[in-house]
Amino acid sequence: MAESRDDFIIAIRSAFLKKSTKQKFSLLTLVFFSVVIIVLSSFNFKAITVTKSVIKEIVYRSSFIVSIPENFIKSSYLNLNEYTNFYKEYKQTKEELDQLKSENISTKIIKSENEELKSLIDGYTITSNKILAKVIVDHESPFLRSIIINKGSKEKIKIGTNIYDRSYLVGRVIEVNYTNSRVLLLTDLNSNIPVSITPGNVQAIVVGNGDKKGEIKYIKNDLINKIDDQGIAYTSGTGSIFKSGIPVGTIDLKDENEKILINFYSDFSQLKYVFAEIDELIPTPIETEENDQTQVSSNTEQIKLDLISDELQILEDSNTKFLEENKELNTLTNNLTKQIEILKSENEYQKSVIQQHNLDQDELEFLRLNLIYSSKCQSKKLFSTGFKVGTEEYKECIMRKGKISD
């Protein structure tokens, strides 16, 4: 029995001596210690109960402190992710708003052009021997004032055809092609227009000066005094170049060089659409077919009027549709503006949340340093080297990692 006991003791000593078995022995010791504590706790000893409570308190507090950084990082990640999504939605909404504003501007431009065309077509229906033409090229040089229109011999335009801006004379055709024509404007140096000036019924010639005005020339000296400032000049019909009675402009006697100038009614730099006055085709008189030709001409004019009426109706419907779409776009723009304001407020809220998280992080850093350096910064009963807990000096000492002063 004694020999077996000695063998057990020798085995224990060898276990302590061997380095490879030290960890196994430590593990066995901890297991033995745990079993002892569990057994003793079943007897409700006060010391064991207090020890268990202290250990649980330490474990719970440590778990809470250790979980704070993890929870903070997780919450910050979620908030940043949400903020990123808000920002993406804000950018997308802003791009949509810019696109809607661009479409709204395009709608306004189309509406303006439709109104202009409608007013021109209204005038066109009154005068059947005028056709509407668009200015496609505007030639401007120190000596040449002319435009190119999109009507030519195909539409019965010929050299000498009068061109109007509504009811005001602006020039005449000097070159004709099949689908376009060149128009010499009244302001060109080569333009000469016989006019009558009222009051006084003074006959004169208006010559273009290459700029925005014309000059009255070839007038007798004794008739100059009969011309009043702001008098009206209109075509006289002399030479059969222009029809008589077409408004041209008003007289301007305020020139520094004492020239008699004329301000044209039309602004030639703003011409976009003009009217060309064409001669109505007169069929060859054949007695046997006279009635048929009259009926065909009447039907043709009626077809033209019907077509123009249909075009006017289409334009009115288009304008109505554009107005409705414009209202919808304005409503959508207002809604998008409100959404942007909401996103801005939410953005400000997210910024405040992030700032609050930054403050919480500073507080967490203080708590961490407080656990380490509180003993160095607290005031002692026998020594007055520290600070009272809770004061600003105590907090600054903790943030300085226990240094009493810099």
Image (cartoon, grey):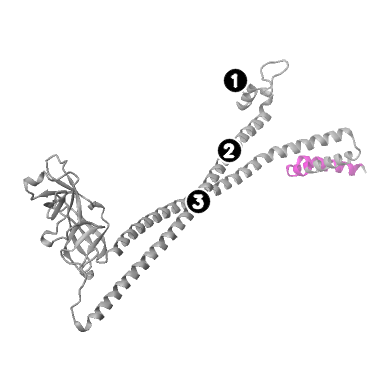
Who's the residue at 58% across and 40% down the image?
349
Which residue type does callout 1 highlight?
A: Ser
Residue found at the very far bottom of the displayed protein: 288
Which residue type does callout 3 highlight?
A: Thr
- Residue 171 appears left or right of 384: left
Which residue type does callout 2 highlight?
A: Ser
Q: Name the residue tied to disc 3.
A: 93
Specify few, some or many for label 1: CA neighbours under 10 Å numbering under 14, 14-19, or 20 or more: few
- Residue 372 appears left or right of 346: right
Instruction: State the image coordinates of residue 148 (x, y, percent, origin top left).
Output: 21, 60
Circle on res. 405: 1
Alpha carbons under labels 3 and 1: distance apart: 55 Å
Of marks 2 and 1, the one in the foreground = 2
Give the quarter of the figure containing the C terminus: top right
Residue extent of the magenta highlight: 2-26
Most common secondary structure along the magenta stretch: helix
Q: Name the residue tied to disc 2.
A: 352
Alpha carbons under labels 2 and 3: distance apart: 23 Å
Foreground pick, 375 / 335: 335
Foreground pick, 302 / 134: 302
